[in-house]
Image (cartoon, helix red, strand yellow):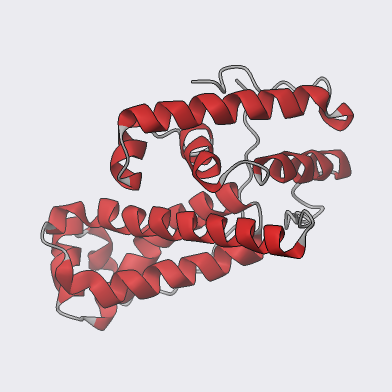
Amino acid sequence: MSILRFHTPLSLVPSPNEKNRGMSDADLARALGKGAAWAHAETWNRFAPQVFGMAIRALGSESDAEDFVQEVFYRVFSKARTLEKPESLRSFIISFAIRILKWELRTKKTRAWLSFHQPETFVDMSSETLDVESRDLLRRFYALLERLAPRDHLVFALRHLESMTVEEIATAMEISVSTVKRSLEHAGKQMSHWVETDLGMVGLSIGKGWKR
C-alpha cells in the first residue's frame, strides 16, 4: 500500500567526541545513568531523529513534534538511572515516546470535545518539500486520523506509519495483542470509509491493507 510520508530535518548538537558515536547503546546508557554531560548530547544525536520522525508522522505537525521531542528527552534524562538493562536504551526511549504520544493524543481529543468543534489540522510543510495538492492531501489525511479514538489513532500510526509489528505495538503500549488487532481493525475500517467518502481524496491510492 502507499503511505503518506514526509521528512523534516532536526537540529542536533555537535558531538564533543567523535569516538562516542561508535559506542554501544549499553555503554552510552551507563554513562547517561552517571550523568555525563557528553552522554546527554550523544543520546540526543543518536535517538532524537527517530523520535522526531515518529512524532511528526503521528501528530502531523512539526511544531508539535519539536515540543514533543523536548518532553521525551527531558523525561529520559531524568529517569536514566532507573534503566536496569543498559542494552535496551533504544526501547527505553521509544517506550517513553509512545507513552507521551498516547497522552498527547488524549489531550488533543479532550480539548476538541470541550471546544465543541473539530480542531483545524496543520501540517507544517514548506513549499520546497510538497506541492499545494500534496499538502492539501496531508491535511485531509491528518484530519481523518484525528477523528479516530486516541488508542486507535496511535495503534494505526505505529503499525502503518512506523511499520511496527502487532507484537511490538502490544509491548510498547502495554496492551494485549488481541487489543492491538481490534484497534487496527476498527481504525482501518474507519479510515478506509472516510477516505472513500472524501471527494478530495478520491483516487488516492491508500487504504488497502489498513484493516490488518
Locate residue 11, reporting x and y percent.
53, 68
User: Eyeballing the image, is 118 above or below 35?
Assistant: above
Q: Quadrant of the N terminus?
A: top right
Give the left or right position of residue 136, taking residue 156 as reference.
right
**In the rendered image, which quarter is residue 180 located in?**
top left
Residue at 31% across / 69% down in the picture?
76
Identify the residue at the far top of this view.
208
Q: Nearer the viewer, residue 166 or 161?
A: 166
Q: Nearer the viewer, residue 95 or 194?
A: 194
Locate residue 48, reporting x and y percent.
43, 61
Residue at 79% across / 56% down in the picture?
117
Give the left or right position of residue 121, taking residue 184 as reference.
right
The reply to whether residue 100 is in sight is yes
User: Eyeballing the image, is 164 above or below 111?
Assistant: above
Give the left or right position of residue 153, taking residue 25 as reference.
right
Give the left or right position of residue 126, taking residue 100 as reference.
right
Number of marks: 0
User: Eyeballing the image, is 116 above or below 34?
Assistant: above
The reply to whether residue 165 is in sight is no
Residue at 39% across / 56% down in the picture?
99
Locate residue 124, reporting x and y percent.
73, 58
Locate residue 24, reporting x and y percent.
18, 56
Q: Nearer the viewer, residue 116 or 75?
A: 116
Q: Nearer the viewer, residue 72 or 26?
A: 72
Residue at 15% across / 53% down in the picture?
87
**In the rendered image, which quarter is residue 109 located in?**
bottom right
